[in-house]
Amino acid sequence: MSDSTLASVTLPSLKAARSARDRLARAGFARNSIEIDRHGDAFEVSINTREENRDRAERILTGSPLGNDLRQAGEQAADFVQANQPLALGLAALAGFALFGLTNRR
């Protein structure tokens, strides 16, 4: 890759480094172009990519793991609802009846 450039970030733990690698892979970057190297107590995640993708890779590398985890949990919840529509509708109806009962108290 003659027109490739390196994007990297140093993270404090192997778990954080693996999380960054997984975020890159989910964003469509090739897993075999992502490297994790140990430097003392820290870990460096680096990726060789084209120049036009460098900024996006750096945003992903320095992005919030919490935000990523929340988005992933939301996607899993949406997948569960899609796979179990009758159960989801039943739970929504039950919640509606409970709210109706709570709001009509006297």
Image: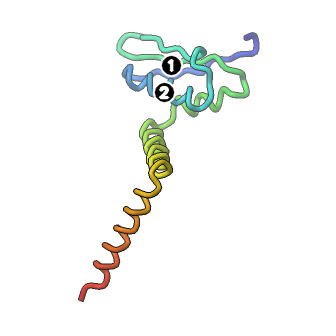
Q: Quadrant of the N terminus?
A: top right
Q: In the picture, which quadrant includes the C terminus?
A: bottom left
* Figure quadrant of residue 25: top right
Q: Is residue 79 above or below residue 97?
A: above
Residue type at numbered disc 1: Val
Identify the residue position indicated by label 1 in the image.
Answer: 45
Q: Is residue 81 left or right of residue 26?
A: left
Percent position (x, y) of residue 34? 56, 17
**Label 1 Cα neighbours within 10 Å, binned few <14 / some 14-19 / many ≥20:** many
- State yes or no: discs 2 and 1 in contact (Cβ < 8 Å): yes
In the rendered view, would you say 47 is above or below 2? below
Is 1 situated above or below 50? above
Query: Which comes before the other along the chain, label 2 or label 1?
Result: 2
Element under disc 1 = strand
Q: Residue furthest right?
A: 3
Q: Secondary structure at mark 2?
A: helix
**Residue appearing at x 48%, y 27% in the figure:** 20
User: Which corner quadrant of the image does residue 26 belong to?
Assistant: top right
The residue positioned 35% from the left and 14% from the top of the image is 41
Colouring of the image: rainbow
Q: What residue would you read off at disc 2?
A: 20
Q: Quadrant of residue 56?
A: top right
x and y, in percent, of residue 32 in the image: 58, 14
Label 2 sits on what residue type? Ala
